[in-house]
Image (cartoon, rainbow, N blue to C red):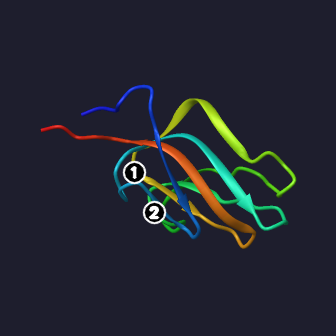
Amino acid sequence: MGYTPYSCGYQRVTASGAIGDAGKPVLLCGYGVESGGTAAQPYFNNGGALAGSDVAFRPGPITVSQGNVNAMGLPIMFPKGLWISFDANTTAVTAMYVLQSVTT
């Protein structure tokens, strides 16, 4: 078990959904939020959609006129998987992440 050091992939979602393989541990290394013009505030959840999951954080509010990409110095662990929930003003979210790889 482990992670490939010094590298991460990315996934862009245009609606609420899982990043990587749903339910598998994810290290979030950074994110970018796109807004249609008004303030966007998506939820980054540990696990599934809001019901029964842990909200780790809400970036923002973010508008189109602001810098909206955040590269983290240290990644955030989502042990139950990473689910991003959109609010009405969020157009898309790009997550830079590392998915746990399992070697048997």
Q: Quadrant of residue 38?
A: bottom right
What kind of element bears circle 1? Answer: loop
The residue where tag 1 is placed is 80
The residue where tag 2 is placed is 48
> Which residue type does callout 1 highlight?
Lys
Q: Position of residue 41 (x, y in %)?
A: 73, 59
> Which residue type does callout 2 highlight?
Gly
Query: In the rendered view of the protein, which quadrant contains the N terminus?
Result: top left
Q: Position of residue 103 (x, y in %)?
A: 18, 37
The label on residue 53 is: none
Report the side of 66 relative to 58 (left or right): right
Q: Report the front residue among 9 and 38.
A: 9
What kind of element bears circle 2? Answer: loop
Q: Residue at x 59, y 53 (%)?
A: 94
Q: Earlier in the sequence, mark 2 or mark 1?
A: 2
CA neighbours of label 2 inside 10 A, class few (<14), some (14 to 19), many (20+): many
Q: Position of residue 35 (x, y in %)?
A: 76, 63
Q: Report the front residue among 9 and 48.
A: 9
Q: Residue at x 55, y 49 (%)?
A: 95
Work out whether 4 lies above or below 84.
above
